[in-house]
Image (cartoon, rainbow, N blue to C red):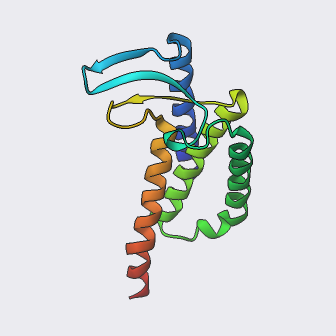
Amino acid sequence: MAGGLFIVLLALDQFVKALVTLTMVPGESIPVVGGFFHITYVLNPGAAFGILPHQSWFFILAGAAMIAAFCFYYPRLKQQCAYFHYGCIALLSGSVSNLIDRVRSGLVIDFFDFRVWPVFNIADIAIVLGVASMIYAILYKEKETDE
């Protein structure tokens, strides 16, 4: 099941990024819900919110380290509660998808634009939900097993 989640998230993000790349030009924006939600093709040279722009090698090395750490700790992760285990899978999937972009071009393709938040992608959603799930597990699920 974990492998399936990883593949689905990775494939969905890469598919939508390919679709955006093939049908739009960088900077182009298509209104979906006028004034609120657009599909905007952005090439992000940095991390979240564009921090550390043009530091591709740093992000590539950090991504490789994350993959190595995940592989090393995975036997222990499988024994954790589902919220923590699948949170780690979602985090890894999003990280790998953005890493693929960085290796390919040095830039991450973003496209969801709510006009009140920086433009982001499906991989970013997977990362945020994965971390939220892990935090939930640490704060609430770990306490349940201690009682």
The residue closer to the viewer here, 120 or 50, is 50
The picture places residue 137, in percent across and down from the top left corner, at: 43, 68
Query: Residue 28's quadrant in the figure?
Result: top left
Q: Is residue 1 visible?
A: no
Q: Is residue 89 left or right of residue 111?
A: right
The residue closer to the viewer here, 3 or 105, is 105
- In the rendered image, the vertical position of residue 82 relative to residue 46, given as above or below: below
- In the rendered image, the vertical position of residue 113 relative to residue 124, given as above or below: above
Residue at left offset 50%, top offset 12%: 24
- In the rendered image, the vertical position of residue 123 relative to residue 31, given as above or below: below
Q: Is residue 118 left or right of residue 51?
A: left
The picture places residue 17, in percent across and down from the top left corner, at: 54, 25
Query: Residue 104's quadrant in the figure?
Result: top right
The picture places residue 41, in percent across and down from the top left corner, at: 48, 21
Residue at left offset 40%, top offset 73%: 139
Residue at left offset 55%, top offset 43%: 51
Q: Is residue 109 visible?
A: yes
The residue closer to the viewer here, 110 or 75, is 110
- In the rendered image, the vertical position of residue 80 relative to residue 15, given as above or below: below
Query: Residue 106's quadrant in the figure?
Result: top right
Quadrant in the picture for the C terminus: bottom left
The picture places residue 69, in percent across and down from the top left corner, at: 70, 60
